[in-house]
Amino acid sequence: MNSIFITGAGSGMGLETAKYFSQRGWFVGAYDIDGDSLENLSGELPKDYCQIKRLDVANKDDYQSVINSFSDATSGRLDLLFNNAGIGKGGYFDEQSFEDILSIVNVNLLGVLHGIYLASELLRNTENSLCFTTSSSSATYGMPGLAVYSATKHAVKGLTEALSIEMSRYGVRVADTLPGLIDTPLIPEGWRASAPSEGMFRLIPASEVAQVVWDAYHDTTGRLHWYIPEEIAELDKASANDPEGTRKKLSSLNGFE
């Protein structure tokens, strides 16, 4: 039986992915720091084909314990590691508390490093395995008001690119997804209400991310970055080709000009 390990599985994209893969006969390891959301998830998945546990991705010892438990449940098989846990706290960088800054780094970057490092042996020992991580559209260009969040997602994107080469020596595939505005508990209510009805930053249901995770596992082209929606790719290209022009547009949109 195929198996998937999902962090941040208690809500949003992680929850939808857990349900999607479970409905298709996969063993699902579903992990989150929020115990209440895991309680709700336990009613969504068949008890014989899942493992649901609390996990603080920023705590390496905690992560190691959960990886060991997952390995015992799957006989050492890990077809898909979905590093999805993340937090977002906005505000101007100099006005944020340093504690908030560190919490973003610890979950969004350190948590990803823990996951890949600790699960690498299972991935290497599973044929056609995929290491898949949630980056963000804010990894296309540094977003004002989300500087630290954006920095962690840029780091995830760069890590993915490097590891896609390094881990190919074991036959392990590595890729990421760069979602735009996804309808999850992470986004502030004001953003949800003001989201455009069309365009790259339209509000997208979390179920579309689950479909992309599924498509990425079954991909045979070696695709590296999965944009949701696809138009985000154009922003990525534009920001790389004309970073100053992109800065000017973002400055204007944010009232700095």
Image (spheres, helix red, strand yellow):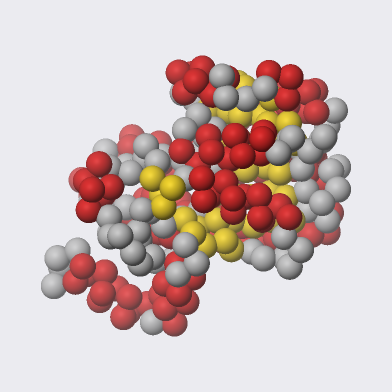
Is the C terminus in the top left, top right, bottom left or bottom right quadrant? bottom left
Q: Position of residue 117 (x, y in %)?
A: 69, 42
Residue placed most toward the observer, 207 or 54: 207
Residue at image x 66%, y 56%? 216
Tell which of 246 and 48 is nearer to you: 48
- As drawn, is 58 to the left or to the right of 166? left
Q: Is residue 257 above or below residue 110?
A: below
Q: Is residue 241 above or below residue 161?
A: below
Q: Nearer the viewer, residue 216 or 66?
A: 216
Q: Quadrant location of the N terminus? A: top right
Left or right of residue 79: residue 213 = left
Q: Is residue 71 in view? A: yes
Which residue is depicted at the point 73% across and 55% down? 218
Residue 160 location, x and y as percent? 62, 57
Q: Is residue 64 above or below residue 235?
A: above
User: Closer to the camera, 232 or 106?
Assistant: 232
Residue at horizontal 66 percent and vertical 55 percent from the top: 215
